[in-house]
Image (cartoon, rainbow, N blue to C red):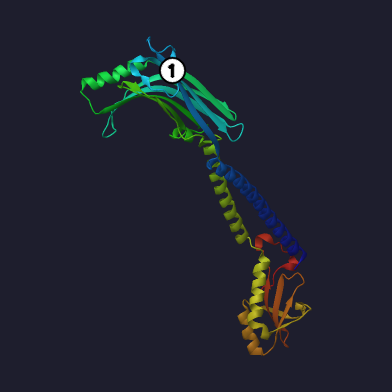
Amino acid sequence: MSEIERLQRNIYQKRRKTVIVFLAVVIALVTALLAFVGVTYYKMNKDTYVSYTEKGEVIYKAYLADNQFYSEEYLNGSHAYVSTLIEKMTADFSYKLQMETDNVKYQYSYKVDAQVEVKDKETGMAIYNPYFELIAPKTKSSSGKKLVIEDSVAFNYDAYNRLAKNFIAAYNLDETESTLIVRMYVAVLGESEKFANESQGNYIIKLCVPLNKATVTPFVETPAEDEQGQILAVKHSNKSLYKKLVIAAAIADIALIIILVIYATVTVDKHLDYARKVKRILSNYKAYIQKINNPVDASRYDVLNVDTFTELLEIRDTLQNPILMYENLDKTCSQFFIVTATGILYMYEVKVDFGEEDLVYTEEETPIEI
């Protein structure tokens, strides 16, 4: 190989290597970005909940009308009350929440209402059940490990009792049960639209007082003590942005890999193609070839180039002369030739071919024309 050919080969290899390394670095960076964004998006989609325990209770009092039997202003606790002696009642609601960790942002809301419920005894189905708002919904944002909500309501038991009696009497409903239910609803919501749209998170404390009876015994209903729940700890507002970044990075990564593969294939090192050709010839025709270590001085012969190794084999069969092979030190050119006594040298040459655009020939390096 001439110096100019060697120079052109080195320029070609460096240029190709530079492009491949550049593409590989870009692919590595895009892949790293894809991994980072993908993991972030995965964590966003993976709901992270924080556990908590909650407990509710209600303390009620029955304020008595003027009578000759009770000196107390009100009665409380587990009492059976004469319904006609009850003037009004109060309920002190209390709700306590304990988080398992600090610094969790959340929203909470609560409200209190009363419901007069008239049910059919046999089926248990409600016949009449109007609601009355006692405390309008209150919503606040907070953070911390503990939450305590305390609020009180007063309600006219006698008015609700008369309402139930009048309804039952108006329609001659004998087989019925009627109850006044005073409820506090508490909702603890993690700062997430998804969680807020679900019906979870409501904790209901009930004070139930029978109606339309001579004597009544109020009772309290709450969820199981230390009821456990979960809220979504973090609200991710950029999910859609990260999703778009994941898709864009994945498309870019795949496109760059395809470009790299195509470029590496199209610009495959010509040495590989050369080596494959030489190896194939030696593998198939090793018995007919004799390797030599010194180049042949072609200037002493009339050189006849042949186009294929098969033609050289045919000449060998005709002349019964051995095929000699010489490969240069750069392993970029192998010459197969047959030397004759008449001064004619038949040659088949395999070399690294960079194409006309990559080679610059001098007058001394102009290929021999046959």
Q: Is residue 291 above or below residue 272?
A: below
> In front: 75, or 318?
75
Q: Nearer the viewer, residue 315 or 236?
A: 236
Asked if one can make out residue 231 in the rendered structure from this viewpoint, the answer is: yes
Is 143 on the left-hand or right-hand side of 208? right
Residue situated in front as seen by the camera: 250 or 209: 209
Q: Residue furthest front?
A: 69
**Percent of width and height locating residue 363:** 74, 66
The image quarter in which residue 245 lies: top right
Q: Position of residue 177 (x, y in %)?
A: 29, 27
x and y, in percent, of residue 280 in the image: 63, 76
272 in relation to 118, above or below: below
Quarter occupied by residue 261? bottom right
The C terminus: image quadrant: bottom right
Q: Residue at x 23, y 26 (%)?
A: 174
Residue 237, visible in the rendered structure: no
What residue type is disc 1 on?
A: Leu
- Indicate whether 213 appears above or below 275: above
Identify the residue position indicated by label 1 in the image: 75
Residue 311 at x, y percent in the picture = 61, 81
